[in-house]
Image (cartoon, rainbow, N blue to C red):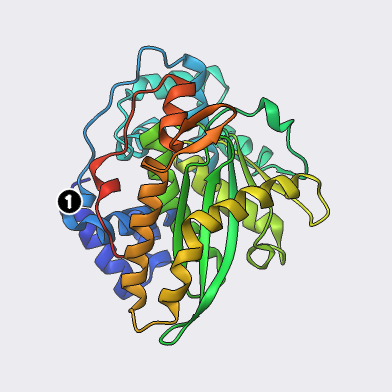
Amino acid sequence: MDAKKKYEILTEGQKEGVSLTCRTYGISRTLYYRWLSRYKANGMKGLQTGRMAKAPANLTDEETSDQVLGLIRSYPSYGPREICYLLEDYGKKISESCVYNIMRRHGLSTREKRLRFAKKKSGPLLFSLPPLHSLKSGECLLFFLTPCASHKETGMVYAYTLMDYKSRIACTRLYTELSVSCFIDLLTAAAVPVAHSLDLRPKYLCFSEGKALYEKNRHDFSSGIHEILQSSGFDMTLFFLEEDDLLNSDFKTLKNEYYRVCLASMMPLFLSDEPLDQIKLHLQRRIRSYNIQLKISYEGLVMSPTEYHSHVTGSSRILPLWAYIDRIY
């Protein structure tokens, strides 16, 4: 689908309602909001289909299958052609026949079988993590929710942060409310693109804070987030840690250090006459500097978070150009 058609769908969604528009065009709400985030960030250019990326030579059949199966769980009514379309939106090249072969190998060649397959597994909920020393860089994302200060124009401002436990690569955005939609925006517009760009392969998403977002119905929350993650090519387990969990002390140490380095100096800005949009841009630059330039100690190694991840994974990837550009959200 070309950029013009995507723009027409976005416009219709704003006028007629997202749910109705998605049903009309046979797309998911997740895909609609992903297009909307890209349009907000880069205009019509953000709606253009990305350059096709051939699967790397070391990508195993199992990894390819996992990505296809994740999409089938989210969109069980889709056939091979539609799954190819979703993969294309991520700039990934895979043939329709290859998708069909994966479906056939897993007994999912018919729509009825795919629907039964999707019902068997929803986002898993666990309350303990594997030993922290066994986690690799890029495998475990932590969610932090930090009340910042009351801004005179918008009221209370909250910092939403997703951080990789091992490398400490972080994405942070400011929002003026406590809501699932804010977390989804951080996840889809910031964390997922960074994970793809740096070749992070997260297996776990851990909530040690922010109960206000999910405490009413964890199952519905996890199912919605899991669908977004799977449509983004990630199959992750969600963890909800209780206050007395021993792991929380370790996570709180990381959060406190991150607050000291990246957020503490921002506090006076909330009490100034600085517009919130400008404060957001200040924070973007600070997080950018933190991820790329700030040197941190990693058991004898002194590197920036992105340098550390590249070092321990052997990856030579760097952040794309958009990661260096200020963007209003």
User: Residue at 53% across / 50% down in the picture?
Assistant: 162
| Residue in front for this viewpoint, 228 or 162 | 162
Circle 1 crowding by C-alpha within 10 Å: few under 14, some 14–19, many from 20: few
User: Residue at 39% across / 36% down in the picture?
Assistant: 196
Amino acid residing under circle 1:
Lys
User: Residue at 27% across / 68% down in the picture?
Assistant: 12
Name the residue carrying label 1: 45
| Residue in front for this viewpoint, 141 or 75 | 141
Quadrant containing the C terminus is bottom left
- Depicted 318 relative to depicted 277: above or below: above
In the figure, is residue 227 to the left or right of 128?
A: left
Outermost residue on the bottom side: it is: 152
| Residue in front for this viewpoint, 188 or 116 | 188
Spot occupied by residue 286 in the image (x, y as percentages of width and height): 38, 55
Is residue 8 at least partly visible in the picture?
yes
The total number of labels drawn is 1
Which picture quadrant has residue 37? bottom left
Quadrant containing the N terminus is top left
Outermost residue on the right side: it is: 244
Which picture quadrant has residue 327? bottom left
Is residue 27 at least partly visible in the picture?
no
Spot occupied by residue 131 in the image (x, y as percentages of width and height): 74, 30
Spot occupied by residue 121 in the image (x, y as percentages of width and height): 66, 39
In the figure, is residue 138 to the left or right of 44?
A: right
- Depicted 2 relative to depicted 274: above or below: above
User: Residue at 53% across / 46% down in the picture?
Assistant: 163
Outermost residue on the top side: it is: 57
Spot occupied by residue 250 in the image (x, y as percentages of width and height): 71, 45
